[in-house]
Image: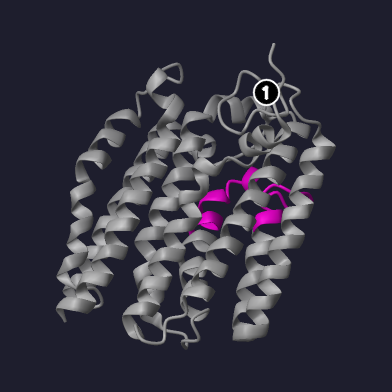
């Protein structure tokens, strides 16, 4: 058996394929700022915010793997996670240490942003840090108390979009919060798809998620509402001129949404192989939707 390099193992552990979930809100928030001040937009700040967001995300992935494994939730048979711990590719201590190093680097970058942009960034940075840590860490373990979906919605929707916007030196704007809502709905849908697939495994492990608490029928409806909420919020914002009609480009993703709806059904059996990748497919949907929304912001600037 060929021995894996340390770099490839860490690459597997941090799950970079999931980084679109943190990239999209930063792109949307940054393009909102660029639309307001194209001549004063700081690309250095943009890349610093993006790097900080990705490091926070990677640290959260590692610490989530650690607690899911030590609590007996993540096994060789379950879906999700990087699987470096159930297969003995890395030790729990090493994964926890890697998470700690990433948190230290992320905090250092965050403090530099605070130095450049002020305390508003500090508040959001603290929220991101605590949110990432206590998503799975004791004594809170938000993920295990059926609060993961609203938690992720808030942190990787409004707060992340707003953080990228404020980092450009702009004042708080409610328009930014409204425009962040479809991003929040869909990033929450990623987690909900994961939880829908893992209902039986989570129930056996004794943890509560929004999906396991309500059962498959309720969980399927909740997933549909998250997807519908993203589209409906865009329609409302176009009607109220918060977004330009170009934002309707997001409706190009409807065929993907319909495909996902056909997978996540109240009568979908847990053994259905289509469920294996439904969280990743939802993440791809979130990425394309968010990218089209960001592009619409750029187009609206040039066509205004």
Q: Nearer the viewer, residue 66 or 101?
A: 101
Residue 140 at what x, y percent from top left? 73, 53
> Which image quarter is the N terminus in?
top right
**Residue 241 in sight in this render:** no
Which segment is the magenta one?
132-153
> Which image quarter is the C terminus in?
bottom left
**Residue 287 in sight in this render:** yes
Residue 45 at what x, y percent from top left? 53, 75
Q: Considering only vertical position in the picture, is 116 above or below 137? A: below
Q: Nearer the viewer, residue 259 or 199?
A: 259
Residue at figure coordinates x 40%, y 38% from the top left = 218
Residue 3 at what x, y percent from top left? 72, 20
Q: Considering only vertical position in the picture, is 46 above or below 95? A: below
Residue 104 at what x, y percent from top left? 77, 61
Q: Considering only vertical position in the picture, is 130 above or below 210? A: below
In the rendered image, the residue lying farthest to the top is: 1
In-image side of 288 versus 248 (left or right): right
Quadrant housing residue 35? bottom left
Circle 1 residue: 75
For mark 1, give the secondary structure: loop
Label 1 CA crowd tier, 10 Å (few <14, some 14–19, many 20+): some
How has the structure been colored for display? one colour
Does the magenta portion include 288?
Answer: no
Q: Considering only vertical position in the picture, is 124 above or below 201? A: below
Residue at figure coordinates x 61%, y 34% from the top left = 81
Count up the numbered dots: 1
Residue at figure coordinates x 59%, y 85% from the top left = 117
Does the magenta portion include 144?
Answer: yes
In-image side of 107 versus 49 (left or right): right
Q: Nearer the viewer, residue 277 or 226?
A: 277
């Amino acid at each position: 058996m060929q021995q894996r390099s340390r770099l490839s193992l860490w690459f597997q552990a941090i799950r970079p394929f999931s980084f679109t979930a943190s990239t999209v809100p930063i792109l949307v928030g940054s393009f909102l700022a660029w639309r307001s001040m194209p001549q004063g937009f700081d690309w250095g700040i943009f890349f610093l915010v993006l790097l900080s967001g990705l490091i926070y995300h990677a640290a959260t992935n590692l610490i989530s793997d650690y607690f899911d494994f030590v609590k007996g939730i993540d096994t060789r048979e379950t879906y999700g996670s990087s699987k470096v711990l159930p297969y003995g590719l890395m030790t729990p201590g090493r994964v926890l240490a890697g998470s700690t190093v990433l948190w230290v680097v992320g905090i250092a970058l965050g403090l530099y942003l605070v130095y450049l942009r002020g305390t508003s960034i500090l508040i959001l940075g603290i929220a991101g840090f605590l949110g990432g840590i206590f998503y799975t860490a004791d004594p809170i373990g938000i993920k295990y108390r059926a609060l993961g979906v609203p938690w992720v919605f808030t942190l990787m929707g409004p707060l992340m979009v707003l953080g990228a916007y404020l980092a450009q030196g702009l004042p708080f704007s409610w328009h930014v919060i409204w425009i962040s809502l479809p991003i929040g709905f869909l990033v929450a849908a990623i987690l909900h798809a994961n939880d829908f697939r893992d209902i039986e495994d989570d129930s056996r492990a004794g943890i509560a998620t929004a999906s396991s608490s309500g059962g498959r029928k309720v969980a399927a409806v909740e997933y549909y509402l998250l997807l519908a909420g993203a589209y409906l919020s865009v329609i409302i914002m176009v009607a109220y001129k918060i977004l330009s009609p170009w934002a309707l480009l997001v409706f190009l993703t409807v065929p993907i949404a319909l495909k996902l709806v056909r997978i996540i059904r109240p009568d979908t059996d847990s053994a259905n192989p289509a469920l294996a990748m439904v969280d990743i497919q939802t993440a791809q949907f979130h990425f394309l939707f968010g990218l089209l929304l960001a592009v619409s912001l750029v187009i609206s600037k040039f066509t205004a």
